[in-house]
Image (spheres, helix red, strand yellow):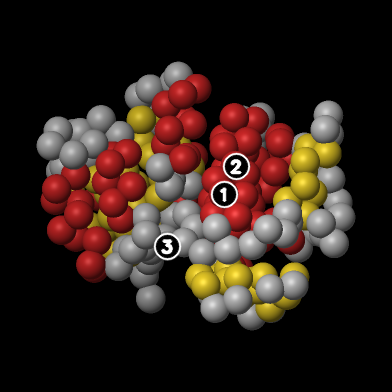
Amino acid sequence: MAYRILIVDDDIELLKMLKNYFEIKRYDVMMAEDGTDALEKIHKKPDIILLDINMPKIDGLEVCRRIRGKVTCPIIFLTAKVEEQDRVNGLLSGGDDYILKPFSLKELDARIIAHLKREERHKGKSEYRFHGDLSIDYGAKRVQIGENDLELTKLEYAIIEFLSMNPGQVFDRERIYEKVCGYDAEGDSRVVTELIRRVRKKLAEYTQTEYIETVWGMGYRWKR
């Protein structure tokens, strides 16, 4: 069965080009010309979303914030911006990746394939792990403390998954960024620092146990 891809951009010519390219690659392509149109098409359950940041009505960051709690598929931002804060904002809003305009179609296709394969690997996991009152279902990507489900963004969950599957090992921010976000680029320590702060805050709502430990000057580790 073909993967379904939702492409959201207010550049009509770019939309047409991407539609033609990915239909040749045998994707089921949906298009949206603005954020409002994108929100109306989310119910069709795309396997991956390409999302322009700068759009009229509702920009890509706001679209991502609104849908992230409802969809788990990868979201790749399309952006002409190159400022570090723009990348940070995109990832913290729930995005999984970004690619700068103008981009190579081959590179974009490779990024999409990598994310889809990663999703398939995650779906295949059925392992559970328990850490005191905390339980992690790696197949369902679900974290509970007692009977309470933690409401986590995709990257917040990925932080917990990566560290908890390697308990006791210390990882610096760059390594965590690489493993969690899957980029070849250098790690963005500000993203990792903020994600871990958010995860700790959500854990602290239900437990006083400190699961993620800061190892000063080195990084972070999951306590055994």
Tell me how far mark 1 sits from mark 2, CA to CA. 6 Å
Tell me how far mark 1 sits from mark 3, CA to CA. 22 Å
The residue pinned by badge 1 equals 201
Q: Could you say whether the residue bearing mark 2 is in a helix, strand or loop?
A: helix
Q: Residue at x 62, y 50 (%)?
A: 200
The residue pinned by badge 2 equals 197
Q: Are marks 1 and 3 in contact (CB under 8 Å)?
A: no
Three-letter code, disc 1? Lys
The residue pinned by badge 3 equals 72
Q: Nearer the viewer, residue 39 or 9?
A: 39
Q: Nearer the viewer, mark 3 or mark 2?
A: 2
Q: Could you say whether the residue bearing mark 1 is in a helix, strand or loop?
A: helix
Q: Residue at x 74, y 40 (%)?
A: 175
Q: Nearer the viewer, residue 42 or 115?
A: 42
Q: In the rendered image of this protein, does residue 109 appear above or below residue 162?
A: above
Return the disc, 1 or 3, that comes first in the chain's sequence: 3
